[in-house]
Amino acid sequence: MTVAVYPGSFDPIHYGHIDIARRAAGLFDKLVWAAYDRPLKNLLFNAEERIAFMRAAAKDVANIEIVSYSGLTVELARRMGAKVLVRGIRVTYDFEMEYQTALMNRQLADDIDTVPLFTSLKYAFVSSSILKEVAFAGGRITEMVPPYVEEALKNRLAQLTDDRGDKVKMISLQE
């Protein structure tokens, strides 16, 4: 059985992430879709919230397992019995970053390979950072995320801009 891990922060997931997860699930016997719990960036959603989004997105795909993890991605892959890491690529910049990360992962675990999947053209412009910025500015994100993510994102951003003083704390290792 070939097991692959699709890791990332997924804050929040969008249709590009879902596209990669579903396509990878069609290529491998089992796909572990893994949310890194503490990336070095500011997050709007905690690990449990991101996992819930991912579970909703993959509820009809039997061979996708959703997990949260900390530590090295290659160590997660080993624990899950995976020999493959799946990464989504949208643009040239993604390729450069993913290539460097793949080389580091190969240095750390030469028995684990990285397989890049190119995002479908209709999602090539979508990133979590951009969609959060568009949502924050009041723009429409309906074509970028599932309805449950759109609602959660709008609610979270409303909390962040609420003047009552009970703002949602951004989660980060940098603090």
Image (cartoon, rainbow, N blue to C red):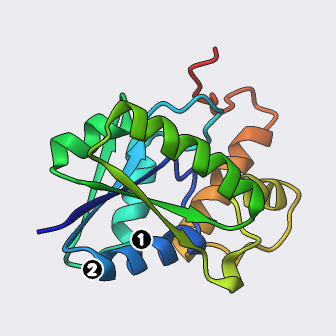
User: Which residue is the site of mark 2?
Assistant: 61
* Point 31% across, 79% down: residue: 27
Using residue 25 as the reference point, say whether residue 151 is left or right of it.
right
Residue 128: x percent and y percent?
67, 56
Q: Could you tell me which secondary element the residue under label 1 belongs to?
A: helix
Q: Could you tell me which secondary element the residue under label 2 belongs to?
A: loop
| In contact (CB < 8 Å): disc 2 and disc 1 | yes
In the image shown, does 142 or 65 lie closer to the viewer?
65
- The numbered dot on residue 120 is none
- Under mark 1, the amino acid is Ala
Residue 9: x percent and y percent?
51, 46
User: Which residue is the site of mark 1?
Assistant: 21
* Point 38% across, 45% down: residue: 48
Q: Residues within 10 Å of mark 1 (few under 14, many from 20)?
A: many
Q: From the image, which quarter does the N terminus lie in? A: bottom left
Q: From the image, which quarter does the C terminus lie in? A: top right
Using residue 70 as the reference point, say whether residue 91 is left or right of it.
right
Which is closer to the viewer, label 2 or label 1? Answer: 1
Occupied quadrant, residue 169: top right
Sequence-earlier tag: 2 or 1: 1
Tell me if I can see residue 143 in this picture: no
* Point 60% across, 75% down: residue: 119
Residue 143: x percent and y percent?
69, 81
- Under mark 2, the amino acid is Val
In the image shown, does 137 or 89 lie closer to the viewer?
89
Using residue 4 as the reference point, say whether residue 103 is left or right of it.
right
**Extreme residue toward the left, this view:** 1
Q: How many numbered callouts? A: 2
* Point 50% across, 78% down: residue: 19
Residue 117: x percent and y percent?
52, 71
Occupied quadrant, residue 151: bottom right
